[in-house]
Image: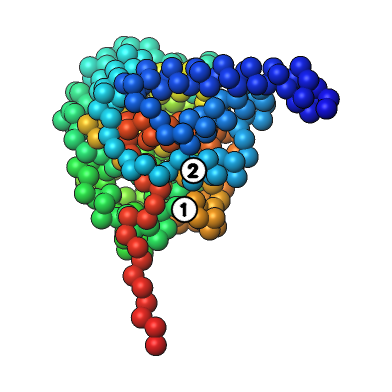
Amino acid sequence: MSERAGGGRGGRAWGARCGALGRVRVRVGRGVGGGVRLPVGAGALGVLVLCWLYVFPAERLPQADDVLDALRAARAPPWAPNHTALRRFRKQLEDCCDPGQLFAMTKLNSPQGANLWYDGEFLYSFTVDNETYSLFPQATPFKLPLKKCSVVGNGGILKKSGCGRQIDEANFVMRCNLPPLSSEYTKDVGSKSQLVTANPSIIRKRFQNLLWSRKTFVESVKVYNRSFIYMPAFSMKSGTEPSLRVYYTLADAGADQAVIFANPNFLRNIGKFWKSRGIHAKRLSTGLFLVSAALGLCEEVAIYGFWPFSVDLGGRFISHHYYDNVLPDSDFHAMPEEFLQLWFLHKSGILKMQLDRCEDPPVRPTS
């Protein structure tokens, strides 16, 4: 057999690399998990992914079928929290990113006259002037730590999941990118919200940058009740004006929702944190930013709707979102990589990832 096919020096190199990476994975697992051993399937998937990243960095991940097979094999043990692992992981987040203090821009962390750099652009910075400073709350506007949090992604795996009631049982519910919460979805995704993100691109595409009718936008966000609208106003220069428009639109309308702005230093540091753990993308997804924040702000975290595959664990086709099948720009985010990182946190007991149905759909009587 040729070396290219894996039987000669190249094959031995592959084996040596995989063995070394497997040992690294064990050490990492002990460091995060407080000595708790992961199930065989979880370790096997970890070695598979790490070897692939090491040997084929351009392609980066094994095929989805390989990942799904490994996930099915590793799901047998019931999930249990690992408080030691959670404390250690939270300490890592605090050391790098300090979510409790830096999650949102406040008068304390962004004083008047401060010069801050946009986290998504290298050439632009901005100075916090008096007008912008007046828009910031004095400090992080919710009492910390939050107790039990649900972070709800928009994945199609939520369809017919019956997870709405379980999601709403949390003390604090976070949602991504102004998702639809009409009555046809609430059984699966719930109706409760305390914080929902809004990317400036959504304001541009759905609401024409609020340059004309603002009433449609004000009406559309009423479904989120008294939520904070979390916006990355100072992530990209092009997003600043739309984000400020959202703030003023809701304030002028006397809306129940309040806008808070993501701190660009927090976003930048979270990006570095995950890059050091193997996620290489132009930008992290909103979902991973939000889960990272929740792990620093909440005592317990459960996540829903985080699933980047076109089939579920039973092999059934599912749409990309629970409300449509519009696919993202595959070159912008690294969704499978993000999923695997979150899944390892689940297997380590740091957060709970809901992949199964919470309640079975009602059975229709046969005639």
Mark yes or no: residue 34 visible.
yes
Observer-nearest of 64 and 143: 64
Looking at the rendered structure, the kind of residue marked 1 is Gly
The part of the image, by quadrant, that contains residue 6 is: top right
Q: Residues within 10 Å of mark 1 (few under 14, many from 20)?
A: many
State the residue at coordinates (49%, 51%).
Answer: 313
Residue on which the image places disc 2: 73
Quarter of the picture containing the N terminus is: top right
Q: Horizontal and vertical percent for residue 178?
A: 38, 46
Mark yes or no: residue 133 visible.
no
Local secondary structure at mark 2: helix
Residue on which the image places disc 1: 156
Looking at this view, name the residue that lies furthest to the bottom. 367
Q: Horizontal and vertical percent for residue 305?
A: 41, 47
Q: CA distance from mark 2 to mark 1?
A: 22 Å
Local secondary structure at mark 1: helix
- Is 287 left, or right, of 24 in this rendering? left
Is mark 2 in CB contact (under 8 Å) with mark 1? Answer: no
Q: Horizontal and vertical percent for residue 21?
A: 55, 19
